[in-house]
Image (cartoon, rainbow, N blue to C red):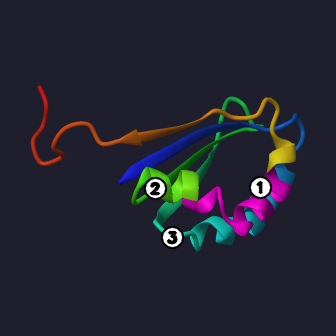
Amino acid sequence: MILEMAVLRVKPGQGSAFQEAFKTAAPMISRAAGYLGHSLHKCIEKPDQFLLLVRWQTLEDHTNGFRGSPDYQRWKALLHHFYDPFPEVLHYELAGDPRRPTA
């Protein structure tokens, strides 16, 4: 499983509009091949900042699959104009064997 992480800095005063647009965009990512789930978190200290976490089966499901799809073009049109600056998107994998704790 791959965890995609993006800190979304929304233009000042646009947080509510972004959240509404995200509700419209969420089904577009949800139907992508390899999609396992997502969550959007609003920052308490910075009300126009959000954390997006998306779980994918593989990195390619996100980078080639979703980003290469017509749904991604609609996603971009709905959401990308809110960001300032454009977010860095990083991908994480589980470190070590989850059944054995590390010291």
> Which numbered circle lies on residue 19?
1
Q: Is 49 displayed left or right of 96 in the figure?
A: right
Q: Position of residue 36 (x, y in %)?
A: 45, 65
Q: Residue at x 68, y 69 (%)?
A: 28
Query: Is 82 part of what is drawn in magenta?
Result: no
Q: Position of residue 103 (x, y in %)?
A: 11, 25
Amino acid type of the residue that numbered disc 1 sits on in the rendered structure: Gln
Main SS category, magenta section: helix
Q: Earlier in the sequence, mark 2 or mark 3?
A: 3
Task: Name which of mark 1 and mark 2 comes first in the sequence.
Answer: 1
User: Label 3: few (<14), some or many (≥20) within 10 Å?
Assistant: some
Q: Residues within 10 Å of mark 2 (few under 14, many from 20)?
A: many
Eye-nearest disc, 1 or 2: 2
The amino acid at mark 3 is: Ala
Indicate the position of residue 94 as horizontal and vertical percent values. 30, 42
Mark 2 and mark 3: span between their CA atoms?
12 Å
* Residue for badge 2: 55
| Earlier sequence position, callout 1 versus callout 3 | 1
- Mark nearest the camera among 1 and 3 is 3
**Residue 24, quarter of picture:** bottom right
Residue 85: image location, x then y, percent: 79, 29
Secondary element under disc 2, as helix, strand or loop, is: strand
Amino acid type shown at disc 2: Arg
Asked whether residue 39 is in view, the answer is: no
Task: Reply above or below: 60 against 102.
Answer: below
Residue 81 is tagged as: none
Residue bounds of the magenta highlight: 65-79
